[in-house]
Amino acid sequence: MINCQIAITVTLIIAFASGCQQERVERKEIIIDAPSAIGTEEDPHARAAFERMQLVDPATHEIPELINQHQVNYARQVLAGQNHKARVTASEWRPLGPVNVGGRTRALAIDVTDENIWLAGAVSGGMYRSTDQGINWERTTHPAMLNSVTCIAQDTRPGFEHIWYYGTGELRGSSSRASGAPYRGDGIYRSVDGGETWDVLVSTSMNRPADFESPFNYVWDIVVDQSGSVYAALYGCVVKSDDGGQTWDVVLGPDLLHPELFVPPIEDLNESGAPFYTSVLLTDAGQLYASMSSFTALGYRSQYAGVYRRNAVDVWEEITPFGFPIEHDRTVMTYSPSQGNWLYVLTESASLNFWRFDGTNWQNRSQYLPAVQDTLPAIDTQDSYNVLARAHPLDPNIVFLGGTNLYRSTNGFSSSDQTTWIGGYDPDGTTAAKYPGHHPDQHELLFMPSDPNQVLSANDGGVRYTSQILAPKVTWQARNKGYVSSQFYTIALSKDEESNKAIGGMQDNGTYMKVFASENSSWKEILGGDGSYAATTPEEKFWYVSFQSGQTYRLTLNKENELTSFAEVDPVGGEGYLFINPYMLDPNNYNRMYMAAGRVVWRNDNLQQIPSGKQNPTSVNWSQIASTEGSSSAVSSLDISTHPAHVLYHGTSYGAVFKTIYTNTDTAQTDFVYQHVIQDDAGRESSGYISSIAIDPTDAQRTMFTYSNYHFPSVFFTPDGGQTVVDVSGNMEENPDGSGGGSSVRWCEIVPLQNGSYLYFLGTSTGLYSTTALDGAQTVWVKEADESIGNSVVSMLDYRSSDGKLIAATHGNGTFETNIEGTLEITPEPVEGSIEVLTAYPNPFEDQVTLLFSIPESGRAVVQVLNSAGQLIKTILNAEQFAGEVSVTWDGTNATGTPVDPGMYFYRVYYDGALKSGKLLYRN
């Protein structure tokens, strides 16, 4: 994991003209990528903790086992029983891409019959196939199928090359090491037409709600030998099928296919003490190797831990070398066909271990791995999340190892002086920059059969290709066109009617902007890291973007969507940010932002007063809303009212919802609204995670909020500002108490119509749902876009009332939009008259004075402070301001930041040719 500090290079040439003339600024702004990460220095598992917090069953405090299967099955029941004419969006849902951004990819293969045909599978985006070496991709699994793909294998026997297998279930992903991770699988899928269509092998699919009963829920590796036998490394064991996957037998490890035979019988494989990580490798000569981790879900060492080889009489013998770490997690293996007896083994332990086996003897080469000799940064596997080892087919001494970065050794890591950094992050840039054309977090590396110097790389950015893997500096190309597998956390539409622009934050891939009108278009990268919340203002004057753990920026872009200025805007003193941290702009005043920071909500009354070019948290105009600091848990969701203005709702990570009435003074009244509470299995009070809040833009009394936890009621509504709260989950839950196969609800949206009625939308872990009427427990939610969005996780929605555009962002399947007819356009309350100075307070002042004025339309405002002699002391504002109240502050310093003498000062406010002025008395 790499430090999350952004490096920003700025060149500013500023000329200031006196009076109300605008600053003339020429800027060349460059924001270098922030790193994506599964954690932070303070919390190495921050992403895991964030995702887990949203999903756990509040009764057990665990993610329910096999909940993915259960929720998909229940979603199918809902779909089968619904009237499709009841869908509220009759128009088509259009795919928006991005077609140029790939997501986390663990499965990658080249067809042995035609190396132009590549197959790739995304962890949460399904299976894809290309017939032109990755220039274009087409999806081959239906969105309504299970979207998890983790490994792939082809039957390479002559006449059988049309048969393929892929495994599902990512056991060690962005979430904690538990078999309740977000991307649970449901067995092995098989294709008999070259990977164009897929069907699940019934023998591997439980397809029923249950505890963790099948090792096929997590498939690490698949290989097919020259007799057609299929070997699969599963959770806890290695299995074999001699009949194309119809039946299976355990060949290594505990017999988890028959947990009922254990004494006592095992109902939950977490209790089996089986190896957490397994792997299987088949050489061209037919030699089989396997590995089993010492790590188990129970925490104690597995008796099966070690490295194994199948001998000539079909018996697996342990060949673990003396000195191999006793405690070890994930192990990966590789070999070179040019020297089939050599085996390389890379294993995760307290430190990385790397060994070479020549068929008889082992050699420990761990001391020569990068960073041990301080010549290169360490191989960072992020706790077994990304671990890769591959040997060159023509030279067994050329070995590639991967963690966050990709390294090449020309002597098999037998010394440290022949190692080159060739991918992941950029060795020639800042710690946050990506290697040109490549992406961090390595999962697979393949060699083209006709020319092994041509290589395919699979990582958290999809698929990459190079024609010269042995070059001193490797040149990579993205091969992601049509491989729509990006994992969105957030999305924000442009506020301008008919604008094509949208901006969204993605896991591992930063923040991208949609700029073209066409469907499935390429998007433009704006910021690196793990993309978080985004927002924009009318006329697209400012864009706000952020990455993990709260670091937030204001950007301006030119007509070519190139960066022209930036400012970091998150507050000094902010702490306790969520991994994906919410903030939002006030729809009645786009100068104003509300931001969650731990247990409190912060408010900034004028973001535009924050100077550009700064890359540090700022104190300018930020203040805590003290009355929101009433919870012991983090603020997890926000929404601000439009009519009437100044009503703030916020929810917490422990299930409480609060309402704050803000009167535009220092006084804010915060009241508790609701918290759904149950008794957990230990008899204690427990609640869930507030994932979203939606205020009716026409009436702030009407508010919806959602819980994202499994086995917990999901959707609630108040028609009267919190006096009455009704559970409107309806058929989103299998059972009224939330138990069963109900989805995790991530987002809600309220859409008012011209006829006075409403549409309501939910983004969930099994797709998009809608209803036209809230009717308590009888509310009927209807599945939308089943042929396009399908069962993809819909992480966020955004809606624009001016033209009825609704956009849905998915975690693994890109984005989609539709236009809703008959929507009611929502506009802020108009500001009458001309510029008016409302107040300056406190006046006299000692530390800081706030000047509050009002403007009827958006435009540039300039505010200056002069001394009693009429000399300019400081320009405290020279920026575009939005209609409504404008707040600026002065801290008693001059343009250089030096405190001025106490005395009488004057302010001048210029706007639209008008001038307002007044007195300020400074008492130091």
Image: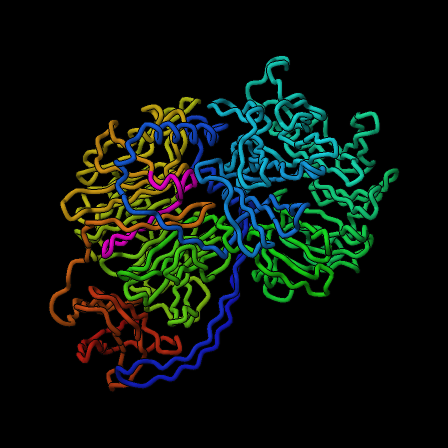
- Drawn side of residue 620 relative to residue 800, left or right: right
List the single residue furthest toward the left. Answer: 833
Q: Is residue 61 above or below residue 844?
A: above
Taking the spot 50% from the left edge, 57% from the top edge, the residue there is 100
Residue 86, percent from left and from top = 26, 36
Residue 669 visible (yes or no): no
Q: Is residue 123 above or below residue 409?
A: above
Q: Please, which colouring scheme is shown?
A: rainbow
Taking the spot 19% from the left edge, 49% from the top edge, the residue there is 822
Q: Is residue 568 magenta?
A: no
Residue 732, percent from left and from top = 33, 31
Total numbered labels = 0
Residue 315, percent from left and from top = 80, 25
List the single residue furthest toward the right. Answer: 360
Q: Is residue 430 above or below residue 222?
A: below
Taking the spot 72% from the left edge, 25% from the top edge, the residue there is 251
Q: Is residue 301 or residue 233 the one in the foreground?
A: 233
Q: Is residue 792 magenta?
A: yes
Q: Is residue 34 above or below residue 346?
A: below
Q: Quadrant of the C terminus?
A: bottom left
Taking the spot 16% from the left edge, 67% from the top edge, the residue there is 838
User: Over which residues does the magenta segment extend?
Assistant: 784-806
- Drawn side of residue 897 relative to residue 368, left or right: left
Residue 289, percent from left and from top = 76, 35
